[in-house]
Image (spheres, rainbow, N blue to C red):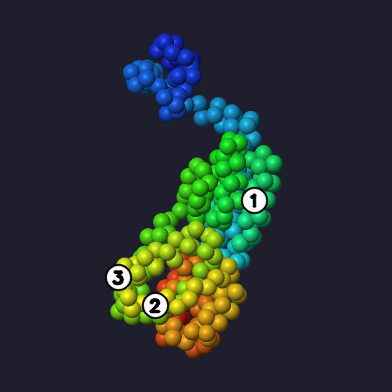
Amino acid sequence: MATIKQIASLAGVSRGTVDRVLNNRGTVNPETAAKVREIAALLNYTPNKLGKTLSIKKKNIKFGYILFGSTNENPFFDDVVAGIEKKSKDLMEYGISVDTRFSQFRNPSNQVKLMDELAESGINGLAITPINHPNVAKKIKELSDKGIPVITVNTDIENSGRLAYVGSNYLESGKTAGGLLRLFTGDKANVGIIVGSMDILCHSERVNGFKQVLKGYSREINIVDIVENGDDDFISFEVTKALLKNHPEIDSLYLASAGVYGACRAVKSVNLGKKLKIISYDCVPTTKLLIEDGT
């Protein structure tokens, strides 16, 4: 079996150059790269997967993962946690471990503390659903500067220097919700908005996208009030009930985050189930039940 050393000798370059070419790392002169690839093809070179696996195992790579609250508070994260656990088991044979922590929903200090703890434990990388707060952004930049790459998941954060973001375009989803409301109401509505927290970027972007569409196209859709439920069904029940009591003119609800089940229970408790237009997100089991029973 051909080796990197043999390819390097025939190409007249270093083994490091061959490694960069074959693994698409760094910058190599295009002519040199083409020559290396040609020789590798002629020799039927294939990577030594066993050697790579053994090399990774020796490094004992460890990743950290920080999510909001617990899955009891927001069932959306059930699938996320299941995915983390499944992939963690797959990675164990390669010597890679994943340490998952849960941060308090609206507590940036707690999230910073968890990041410090994971950094001290020796993580090589971090995935996080961040609170959009300057202290959290500062800590992410600090970890990045120390060589610990950080990826934001499901919601992003401003001015943090994170490596990448994995998630939806929430501004556009908010605009879509605004367009749906216009269709459902004929451009005449009094809307109550219920959101987890405006300190969570994906939540605030959904609200901002929603407002942008209404501002641009309709003058007869009035946003009556915006309240927060902490992504918690019990809190959502209480704030929704209070919102509807204090503003009987509300005829539509925009549920921009979790807590949908609690909000809809509140709507039913005041006998408005068939009278309100409701727009929400996430096809979680509790929301499916509400759709099935006609709520």
- Residue 68 is labelled as none
The local crowd at label 2, few if under 14, some if 14 to 19, many if 20 or more residues have their Cα within 10 Å, is: some
Question: Among all residues in the image, which is located at the extreme bottom?
Answer: 271
Kindly identify which residue carries mark 1: 112
Q: Is residue 151 visible?
A: no
Q: Residues within 10 Å of mark 3 (few under 14, many from 20)?
A: few
Q: Amino acid at mark 3?
A: Tyr
**SS class of the residue under badge 1?**
helix
Mark 3 / mark 2, whichever is N-terminal: 3
Say whether marks 2 and 1 touch (CB < 8 Å): no
Residue 234 rendering spot, x and y as whole percentages: 60, 75
User: Under tag 2, what secondary structure?
Assistant: strand
Residue at (55% x, 82% y) in the render = 242
Q: Which mark is residue 222?
A: 2
Residue 262 picture location, percent across and down: 55, 76
Query: Which of the 4 image quarters holds residue 221?
Result: bottom left
Q: Is residue 236 left or right of residue 187?
A: right
| Disc 1: CA contacts within 10 A as few (<14), some (14-19) or many (>=20) | many
Q: Residue at x 54, y 67 (%)?
A: 196
Q: Which is more N-terminal, label 1 or label 2?
A: 1
Q: Which residue is mark 3?
A: 217
- Viewer-proximal residue among 173 and 13: 173
In this rendering, position of residue 211 left or right of residue 96: left
Q: Amino acid at mark 1?
A: Val
